[in-house]
Image (spheres, helix red, strand yellow):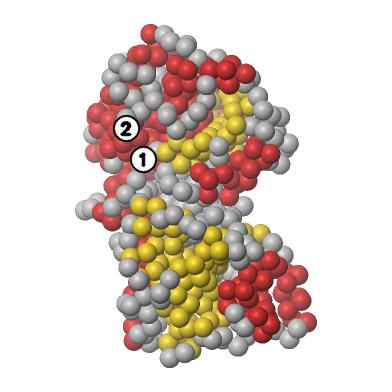
Amino acid sequence: MCGIVGYIGKNKANEILINGLLKLEYRGYDSAGIAVIENNEIVCKKDKGRVRNLYNLEGINELESTIGIAHTRWATHGKPSMVNAHPHLDNHNTFAVVHNGIIENYHELREELIKKGYKFYSETDTEVIPNLVNYYYKEEKDLLKAVNKACKDLKGSYAIEVISKDEPDKIVVARKDSPMVIGVAGNDKYVASDIPAVLEYTRDFYLLADGEFVELTRDEIKFYDEDLNNIEKKIEKIEWSEKATSKEGYEDYMLKEIYEQPKSIRETIGSRLKENEKCQFDDIEIDKNYLQSINKIKIVACGTAMYAGLVAKNTFERLLKIDTEVDVASEFRYRDPLIDEKTLAIFISQSGETADTIAALKLAKHKKCKTIAVSNVIGSSITREAHYTIYTHAGPEIAVASTKAYTSQVVLLELLAIHFAEVLENNSEEIETLKDEILQLPKKVEEALKTGEEVKELANEIYAQKDVFFIGRGIDFTVTKEASLKLKEISYIHSDAYQAGELKHGPIALIENGITVIGIISDKKLVKKSVSNLQEVITRGANVIVVTDKDLSKYNFKKIIKVPETNKLLSPILTVIPMQLLAYYVSKAKGLDVDKPRNLAKSVTVE
């Protein structure tokens, strides 16, 4: 949620700032703005709506400043409006601030500042920050020290940039529980909440940790801890290419990312699995004694990442014979979970910045669990908190609705389960078959993608519907959850997923003439049961679509979408492909913004 960009260097700041904001549109936002120092005065340009609206603001194209900060806002405190948009200034227009996160004690701080004579014009929590900086600057006469003191008053989460007309060649940055990176290219310095914002300018980044402060001037970068002691930071070279963040001829990022899945799965498998060799996870030092000592595995995540965990639960339990539970991160820490040193806890987050998941991870560590982070972003917050980290190699995922990250997460978790089984010496023919099937997945995903045209035709038939239901049994039910989420995320059609066997316990009351029900069938042991459940909704007037790797041509389904056959533990990677395409084409048929659905953000960095 929200996006931050900053720049100090030799080029015009406004062009770099707006370009960076455009690269962060996938994060979700409702307003945008920039602030630069022009002729020793702060000039702020902002408005509600899309980033491109900034180009229409009077005078913005004439700005010559080479220092500035920028922001895309996702409304938390106060409705989307020009007044509530960032950047925010203090009462004397001396300081400008952009902020990601939530200041939990802003009301108390606001009241204190009002007593001291400050006035507030927005409904935001952020506006307290520039006024706090103003208050402390009167005493310190130093921007870094004033920002540091202001941050000590803040409770909650923040990533902030501050500029001041009194120190016109300086940006001060601070971070707590919200992501921020610093990019460098010669004397040009960039600040961003996410790497793709400035990837076209540099591959060299400093990754900030919680409690760190940065002072950027035209000549140098200085890093400090929360007590303003100097610290050393190491530059990380990011291998993502600018090309990876472009559409490359596709109409939308989501479609591009769906079709990138053979590559992202191949990259995620990487060197971890080779033919006739054991599965390698050299970055995880977990041995047989430890695995034999635990009695539980917890997989914790949000949204799509959680559904990837639900798929993997089946493999962990089957191969390891260890009870595996999947928890939604936003609920995990509020129910005092029964976890301890005998629990292995796995946390999944594409961005590595999901606030609820990071908080759950911290709780697990407090309760003595060994923790593993699964992320797509090197150096992200979750990777710095966990004992061990394993990376998907999906590349940047720009569309809000996750596709290639999901299938990459499932593949990586399947590999992890196999690795643990081999560490436990639970060797079996099933494990060897599973490994062979994983190596064939990229080609089979390519085959599944060939369903695109028939799925597009189907989407044109159902896009006007108000309700769509998904049903499945066993591991197929996990796919219906993700399929339903994809459809509602980007097409705004109400959809729900149910275990097929639970239909008669309530949901079948919702079935009426002409409604669409989509069934997923891949487990050969459950084919007859699943078909029987689908026949029940057909008799009540439903139009049934089936995604399957089996020959079901003898049944009277409206449409059968066939995908390649694989081991049932891997089948969700293939059966989900047509469902991703269906969500995409339904949304396109409705004329919606596929990549940036309403009310959603790519990275949920606040609770």
When asked about the image quadrant of residue 183, the answer is: bottom left
Q: Which residue is drawn at 73% across and 86% down?
A: 117
- State the CA–CA distance, disc 2 to disc 1: 9 Å
Please tell me how crowded label 1 is: few (under 14), some (14-19), or many (20+) other residues with Cα within 10 Å: many
Foreground of the two, 381 or 404: 381
Q: Which residue is drawn at 43% across and 20% down?
A: 418
Please tell me how crowded label 2 is: few (under 14), some (14-19), or many (20+) other residues with Cα within 10 Å: few
| Type of amino acid under label 2 | Gly
Q: Which residue is drawn at 57% across and 17% down?
A: 289
Observer able to see residue 441:
yes
Location of mark 1 (residue): 393
| Type of amino acid under label 1 | His
Task: Give x and y (percent) for residue 139.
Answer: 69, 82
Q: Do the residues labelled 2 and 1 touch (CB within 8 Å)?
A: yes
Foreground of the two, 489 or 286: 286
Location of mark 2 (residue): 270
